[in-house]
Image (cartoon, grey):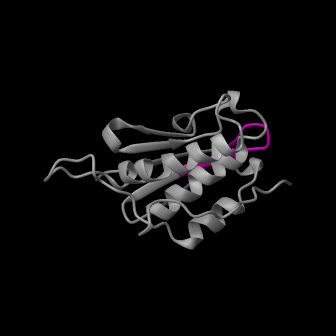
Amino acid sequence: MACLIWTLVACGDSDGKGSSDGASEGEKVSVLAEAHEACLPGIETFLIEGKMEDEATAEEFLTLEDDGASLSIQNPPQGGGNSAPATILAIQCVLDETDAPASVTSELEQTTALMGRQETDWEGVEMSWSYHPDDGLSAVLTTSD
């Protein structure tokens, strides 16, 4: 049985939290919107340095939807065989930015294709994910914030 192997990476700004500079005063920015904003530059840099920017964009790996209430992470089909590391970068950055406990990373690392869709939650964030050797990892995070 193949297990999903993770590479831990650092992302985000210098204090490890996303920025909410785009929000007007008094407007609450969801933790997922902050994670999206903080993680996109790192994914884009990874794609450029890996000469993969013609294959996929950072937004194809990390998509904010539902007015910031959901965040999708996926391995885009056109990303080619080298896109899995960018997906791993995206998920680890989002987990860091949302203060996911280490147990969530452990659960992800132990996921196999035979396990089907998995779910977990922490501090107001719910995440479901699946893994397939051909399609890679896909995850959806939601929040009621």
Q: Residue furthest left?
A: 26
Res 116 visible: no
Q: Position of residue 132 (x, y in %)?
A: 74, 43
Residue placed most toward the observer, 11 or 94:
11
Q: Tell me if residue 90 can be seen.
A: yes
Query: Whole-percent x and y of residue 38?
Result: 44, 53
Q: How many marks?
A: 0
Residue most toward the bottom? 102
Magenta residue check for 129: yes
Image location (x, y in percent) of residue 47 = 64, 41
* Depicted 30 relative to depicted 103: above or below: above
Residue at image position (65%, 52%) is: 88
Residue 39: percent from left, percent from top: 49, 51
Q: Is residue 15 magenta?
A: no
- The magenta segment is 128-137
Quarter of the image where the N terminus is located: bottom right
Asked if residue 9 is positioned above or below residue 74 in the image, the reply reads below
* Viewer-closest of 53 and 58: 53
In the rendered image, the vertical position of residue 52 relative to residue 39, given as above or below: above
Most common secondary structure along the magenta stretch: strand
Say which residue appears at 56% left-offset and 43% top-offset: 44
| 15 up-or-down from 67: above or below | below
Which residue sits at x=41%, y=69%?
15
- Residue at x-position 67% and y-position 45%: 49
Residue at the outermost right position: 1
